[in-house]
Amino acid sequence: MRKHKTDKIIALLVIILMLTSLVIVYAIGGRVAVANNAAKGKHFSELYFFTHHAVIIGLSIASMIAGYKIPYKFLAKIAKKLFWFSIILCLAVTIGGKLNAPFVTCDLGACRAFYVPIISVGFAPVELLKISTALYGAYLIKTRKKAGQLDSKEFWVPYATIFAMTAVFVGGFQKDLGSTVVISMILASMALVGGVPVKSLVIAGGVLLLSAGALIVVAPHRIARISGWEGDGDSYHLQSSIITFGTGGLTGLGLGNSIQASGYLPESLTDSIFSIIGETWGFIGTSLIVMVFALLLSRILRVSERTEDTEQSLFAVSVFAWIISHVIINVGGMLGIIPMKGITLPFLSYGGTSMLFAAFAVGVVIQISGWTKRKDINEDSSSRRGQRRARYASSSRRS
């Protein structure tokens, strides 16, 4: 199989989302800065958030290029080491938070990131864990499938270990149920597509549900979020989000006219940016964003379907599961369809590590797209040429 042109539309769609994010951050960044300065005694300039976000977007585009350039074989080779390194970092950030270390950032009792002073951004190890899980999981399924071991302990022990480590270090220690769900979906999607027996998948699904229930029960703040979603507890964030969408109506208030960004809507630059898009550009704007995500996801899924290498195909599936999980959890939470969970909207939310690693993962998918099979495309082209010849011959006979 020869290398051919890559799917550049994937890169274009990601850049469209990033630029949309930059425009929104520019429009509301000043209001958020003023609100933070007044409420928390900060000293942000009006362009602080825009400048910072522009740097992150530049780094994320570079990260996407790196994902495209670094050979997949090399990434697969270091996948296991990368996974255990990310687990060690997750443990280190937890211990650092307990010791009140200056290099660890904590928010609302959850310590999830290292502070990087050079670019004033937090490095969240869980984002590295997501891509290392995708790489390592794809490798495990390919090798065990080749050996006929998908229903044996040779597969399930290491595969279940990935989930167990995630549940303990991310869902437990870091109190990050959202990322735990995303990584679980990455693992589940690869197992489903990779040919793991249905009976084993059902058992694994039951374990996942029990684990999720346990993580919710042991954390009062998660129960409070569910109560708020049901209308029995603190639902301020959800109500503010719904008001934000309602204020935008069909066409929105227009760029720079946001009201909710002035301290009314929590996390307006990060978790709640989809609500701000609804306020700014209305239902039409949010619908267009959903359409861009749908097109991006369909292109990624197509890469998976056309890739003959099992491991690379599974990696593309994992990136699909990664992005769609984020979109469903974020958008569903903002609309009140599901309980709200603090998780970023890929390539749109203000931040750092999440965008950087998601962009890298997409870059790897673009690399894989250059090695997909072209038979179906060639057959379509041949079919169209045949139809044109038939029409030409028919018209010639009539004349």
Image: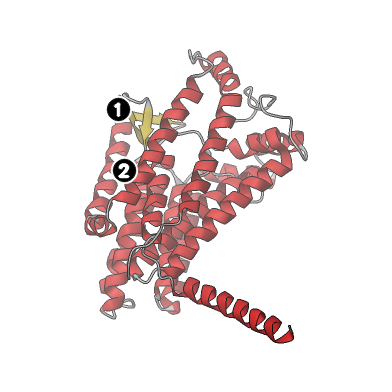
Q: Say which residue appears at 37% left-offset and 32% top-offset.
A: 122
Residue type at mark 2? Cys
As drawn, 108 above or below 399: above
Residue with the most extreme bottom position: 397
Q: In front: 348, or 112?
A: 348
* Quadrant in which the C terminus is drawn: bottom right
Q: In front: 29, or 38?
A: 29
Reading the image, the residue beneath label 2 is 90
Q: Which mark is residue 42?
A: none
Mark 1 neighbour density, 10 Å: few (under 14) some (14–19) many (20 or more): some
Q: Which mark is residue 103?
A: 1
Q: Say which residue appears at 43% left-offset and 43% top-offset.
A: 175
- Give the distance between the C-alpha atoms of the residues marked 1 and 2, in whole angstroms: 14 Å
Q: In front: 178, or 77?
A: 77
Mark 2 neighbour density, 10 Å: few (under 14) some (14–19) many (20 or more): many
Q: Using the rendered image of the protein, determine whether residue 353 is visible from the camera's viewpoint.
A: no
Q: In which quadrant of the rendered view does residue 58 lie?
A: top left
Upstream in the sequence, badge 1 or badge 2? 2
Q: Say which residue appears at 41% left-offset and 78% top-offset.
A: 197
Q: Is residue 144 left or right of residue 10?
A: left
What is the secondary structure assignment of the residue under circle 1?
loop
Residue 137: percent from left, percent from top: 33, 62
